[in-house]
Image (tube, rainbow, N blue to C red):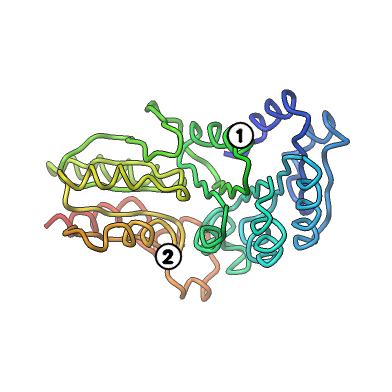
């Protein structure tokens, strides 16, 4: 995901000299080419995320399209007040890009988990929130954020798959058609969901998988149309409460739909282990996804 992001960012910056990048003492082995090509549009502000948000606001006020880059919880939670008051309140053109979505840095523990970032960013005025599930969507979102004249939050996981499907801007996009159950996915947990669907198909269960790369704005029209035919929905995300499941529940609260959410719990703060271990703990690995959907269908 990061490689696709940086390559696409460089393409955009070659065409648009208003793009300016700030990093919080991260991005080594990622931003060297960008800093070499555009030294006057790149600053490493150090481990000072609140300051980075303030600098970004000032540059945006002067007409730049500013991108800030750090680990998911550092450039959201650590500088939440600055994002709220300096960036979103002023509706400034700042793009907050975070890596390490979910448990990507799982062995470093709760300080490095990014499992509240979607919830906090979608609370804010004027903020658009994007969480791509595939390499295709990473490329799309990287280009899209610089066309949006507003704050944007762009969440990047570790590895992701390429997939042949039609991507529509700000829409929920079908990854795989099916008729028995609708599974909504955000983030690179999608690869586990696809593998689980193959196991379920062997049991005769037809699953419609859809990628939700845009969480704000959210494609509620897609949901309203789908629930005319499919009455069971499962949401899957490497994030806690306040993310995809909460959004869908808010929209469908008055509809006669069976809804199940797979997401992380608050007790994640008690653990520090690999991403695979943490995913298994919260039923986000392939086998647990398969079993839970199977029980839900029954």
Residue at (83, 37) in percent of width and height: 41
Which percent across, then down, holds residue 36? 84, 31
- Of residue 85 and residue 71, the one placed in the foreground of this image is 85
Q: Position of residue 282 (x, y in %)?
A: 39, 64
Q: Nearer the viewer, residue 176 or 143?
A: 143
Q: Which residue sits at x=31%, y=61%?
A: 249
| Image mark count | 2
Q: Residue at x 52, y 50 (%)?
A: 129
* Quadrant including the N terminus: top right
The Cα–Cα distance between marks 2 and 1, rounded to whole angstroms, is 32 Å
Residue 65 percent across, percent down from the top left: 72, 40
Residue tagged by mark 2?
Answer: 264
- Residue at the disc numbered 1: 147
Q: Earlier in the sequence, mark 2 or mark 1?
A: 1
Crowd rating for badge 1 (residues with CA inside 10 Å; few <14, some 14–19, many 20+) = few
Name the quadrant containing residue 35. Answer: top right
* Residue at the limit of the structure toward the top, as seen here: 15
Secondary structure of residue under mark 1: loop
Residue 12 % position (x, y)? 68, 28
Q: Is residue 269 above or below residue 32?
A: below
**Horizontal side of residue 151 vs 37, given as left or right:** left
Q: Is residue 261 above or below residue 211?
A: below
Which of 219 and 165 lies nearest the eye of the viewer?
A: 219
């Amino acid at each position: 995901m990061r490689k696709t992001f940086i390559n696409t960012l460089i393409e955009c910056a070659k065409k648009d000299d208003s793009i300016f990048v700030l990093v919080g003492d991260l991005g080594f082995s990622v931003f060297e080419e960008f800093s070499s090509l555009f030294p006057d549009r790149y600053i490493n502000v150090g481990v000072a995320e609140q300051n980075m948000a303030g600098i970004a606001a000032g540059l945006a006020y002067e007409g730049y399209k500013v991108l800030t880059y750090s680990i998911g919880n550092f450039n959201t939670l650590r500088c939440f007040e600055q994002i709220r008051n300096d960036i979103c309140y002023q509706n400034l053109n700042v793009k907050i890009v975070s890596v390490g979505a979910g448990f990507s840095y799982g062995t470093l523990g709760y300080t490095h988990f990014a499992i509240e970032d979607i919830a906090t960013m979608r609370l804010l005025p004027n903020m658009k929130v994007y969480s791509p599930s595939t390499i295709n969507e990473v490329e799309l979102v990287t280009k899209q954020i610089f066309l949006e004249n507003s704050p944007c939050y762009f969440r990047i996981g570790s590895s992701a798959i390429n997939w042949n499907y039609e991507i529509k801007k700000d829409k929920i996009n079908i990854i795989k058609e099916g008729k028995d159950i609708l599974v909504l996915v955000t983030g690179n947990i999608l690869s586990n969901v696809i593998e689980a669907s193959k196991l379920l198909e062997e049991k005769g269960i037809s699953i419609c998988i859809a990628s939700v790369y845009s969480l704000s704005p959210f494609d509620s029209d897609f949901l309203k149309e789908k629930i005319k035919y499919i009455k069971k929905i499962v949401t899957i995300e490497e994030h806690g409460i306040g993310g995809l499941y909460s959004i869908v529940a808010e929209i469908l609260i008055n509809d006669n739909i069976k809804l199940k959410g797979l997401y992380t719990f608050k007790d994640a703060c008690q653990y520090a282990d690999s991403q695979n271990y943490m995913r298994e703990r919260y039923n986000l690995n392939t086998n647990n996804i398969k079993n839970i959907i199977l029980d839900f269908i029954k």
